[in-house]
Structures are given as structure tokens and as C-alpha cells.
Image (spheres, rainbow, N blue to C red):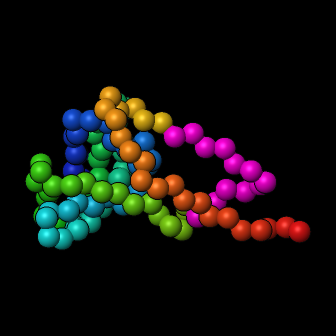
Amino acid sequence: MGSITLTFAKEINESLQVNDAVYYYNGTNTIKLGTCSAIGSDRLTLICGIDNNTARPASSNLILFSKDNLVNTSSIRGYYAEIELKNNSSSQVELFSVGSEVFESSK
């Protein structure tokens, strides 16, 4: 098993963490590259483990990642939650949807 370094023109999504699964979409199929092993301090590069038989992504391929659902299963707890949404883009954007998971935990 080897490793591959991916370099981006813009900062990598801040949700990406070491041990997240990294994929790429080649226009037809979604292919798993491997597991993220390091993220550059400037958040412009990531190092990912990759099997020697896995095709390398082209520079035009979409890079995706997913969380390990065994580790990241917690939800908001308590009587209230406060969130803050930020748009750090210089252009106007539209928020399509915001969802939440709510259940009564005590009576």
C-alpha cells in the first residue's frame, strides 16, 4: 500500500479529519482512494493511503470524503442548541435547507 498527496487550489473542507475515507468521482463511478492520513497545516494538501491497484484520480475529478459512522455518531444533547452559519465566500449564496434531529429524552 502506498500513499498519494492531493493538492488543492482552495482550502479543504474543515470537516475533513485524519482517518476519514477519501473517494473520487470520475464522471461514471465513485472510487475509494483510501484513508486520510495527514492534512497540511495550510489545508491545501492531504495525504491519503492508496492501494497500489487503485487508479489515480485525474486533476478534474471530484474529491469526496466520508466520516466513520462508528466514531461520529453523537448528536446534540441537552435542552437547547445554538448554531452559527457562516458564508466565507465573496459571492452571494443561497441556503437550501437546514435539518435537525429531535427527540424527547426525558419527562
- The residue depicted at 42 percent of the width and 48 percent of the height is 95
Residue 53 seen by the camera: no
Q: Nearer the viewer, residue 2 or 107?
A: 107
Which quadrant: the N terminus?
Answer: bottom left
* Percent position of residue 35, x then y: 35, 58
Image coords of residue 102 (percent x, y): 67, 64
Relative horizontal placement of residue 102, taking residue 105 as reference (left or right): left
Q: Nearer the viewer, residue 103 or 60?
A: 103
**Along the viewing direction, whichever of 23 and 107 lies nearer the viewer:** 107
- Name the quadrant containing residue 90: top left
Q: Which range of residues does the magenta coloring cover?
A: 73-85
The residue sitting at 14% across, 70% down in the picture is: 28
By secondary structure, the bulk of the magenta-drawn segment is best described as: loop
- Horizontal arrangement in the rendering, residue 96 relative to residue 47 (left or right): right
- The x and y percentages for residue 61 are 15, 55
Residue 86 in the image: above or below residue 63: above
User: Does the magenta portion include 89?
Assistant: no
The extreme right residue here reads 107
User: Which quarter of the rendering shows the C terminus?
Assistant: bottom right
Q: Is residue 79 magenta?
A: yes
At x 59% / y 60%, what residue is drawn? 100
Q: Is residue 92 visible?
A: yes
